[in-house]
Image (spheres, grey):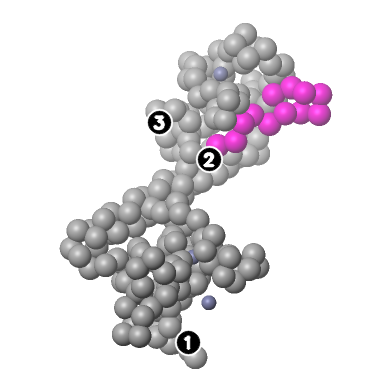
């Protein structure tokens, strides 16, 4: 069963991990409304609410039965499964490789988000007043805040950039927060002044 891919590392990882790989799409649907179940596939990708079913079955055949019985789906006839050609197996390896590359990318992104959140918590705990700014190091803007980079970190930690305050100030065409804040004559932030919603997490 699943000869030709069963020793392929991405396939083994797909099969043995708990649940579905992150970012995997629902089963493709053919022009006649049948679901496509790939060679060696054993985990249900039928949509359930806003996510995917994710149930793991023992074999591709059991997955097909599950899709029909549990989800009332029509499933496309298996292609080439009995005597898969080298080219076909190569395509299937690429399928599982792509899936696991995307999974790893999303996990890394989540870790980056967690690291950024941890850095913010640590900065708060130490009374540093936020993350160190990301500055341009070269070019005409050297020493200025790199608002594009800073906004990317803001989005990694799942906040919205540009924020509503920056939009209200600068219009809907801006693509990043400008991290502005009102200051008094001594350069201190005015309590209750007009502040970019994301400025507080940075030591700007
Ligand atoms: Zn299912
Ligand atoms: Zn401004
Ligand atoms: Zn803002």
**Residue 190 covered by magenta stretch:** no
**Left or right of 66 on screen, residue 112:** left
Please report the residue visible at 23 percent of the width from the left and 68 percent of the height from the top.
128
Image quarter for residue 167?
bottom right
Q: Which residue is mark 3?
A: 17
Q: Position of residue 173 (x, y in %)?
A: 65, 68
Farthest bottom residue in view: 140
Observer-side mark, 3 or 2, equals 2
> Could you say which disc has been placed on residue 23 in the image?
2
Q: Earlier in the sequence, mark 1 or mark 2?
A: 2
Q: Does dot 3 land on a helix, a strand or a loop?
A: loop
- What is the distance, in whole Å, between disc 1 and disc 2 at their CAs? 37 Å
Magenta part mainly helix, strand or loop? Answer: loop
Please report the residue visible at 57 percent of the width from the left and 17 percent of the height from the top.
63
Residue 88, compared with residue 169, is above or below; it is above
Of residue 181 and residue 13, the one placed in the foreground of this image is 181
Q: Position of residue 91 (x, y in %)?
A: 63, 39
Q: Residues within 10 Å of mark 2 (few under 14, many from 20)?
A: some
Q: Residues within 10 Å of mark 1 (few under 14, many from 20)?
A: few
Q: Does dot 2 land on a helix, a strand or a loop?
A: loop
**Left or right of 4 on screen, residue 72:** right
Q: Position of residue 46 (x, y in %)?
A: 60, 24
Q: Which residue is mark 1?
A: 141
Please report the residue visible at 31 percent of the width from the left and 85 percent of the height from the top.
186
- What is the distance, in whole Å, between disc 1 and disc 3 at their CAs? 47 Å
Q: Quadrant of the C terminus?
A: bottom left
**Residue 25 covered by magenta stretch:** yes
Q: Residues within 10 Å of mark 3 (few under 14, many from 20)?
A: few
Q: Earlier in the sequence, mark 1 or mark 3?
A: 3
């Amino acid at each position: 069963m699943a000869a030709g891919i069963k020793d392929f590392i991405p396939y083994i990882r797909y099969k043995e991990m708990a649940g579905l790989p992150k970012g995997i799409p629902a089963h493709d649907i053919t022009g006649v409304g049948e679901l496509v179940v790939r060679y060696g596939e054993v985990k249900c990708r039928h949509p359930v609410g806003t996510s995917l079913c994710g149930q793991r079955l023992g074999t591709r055949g059991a997955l097909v039965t599950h899709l029909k019985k549990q989800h009332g789906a029509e499933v496309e006839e298996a292609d080439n499964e009995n005597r898969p050609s080298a080219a076909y197996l190569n395509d299937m390896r690429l399928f599982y490789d792509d899936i696991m590359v995307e999974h790893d990318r999303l996990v890394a992104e989540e870790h980056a988000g967690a690291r950024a959140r941890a850095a913010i918590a640590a900065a708060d705990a130490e009374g540093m007043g936020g993350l160190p700014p990301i500055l341009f190091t070269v070019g005409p803007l050297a020493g200025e805040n790199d608002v594009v980079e800073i906004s990317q970190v803001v989005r990694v930690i799942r906040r919205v950039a540009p924020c509503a305050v920056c939009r209200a100030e600068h219009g809907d065409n801006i693509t990043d927060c400008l991290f502005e804040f009102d200051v008094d004559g001594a350069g201190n932030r005015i309590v209750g002044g007009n502040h970019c919603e994301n400025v507080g997490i940075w030591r700007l």
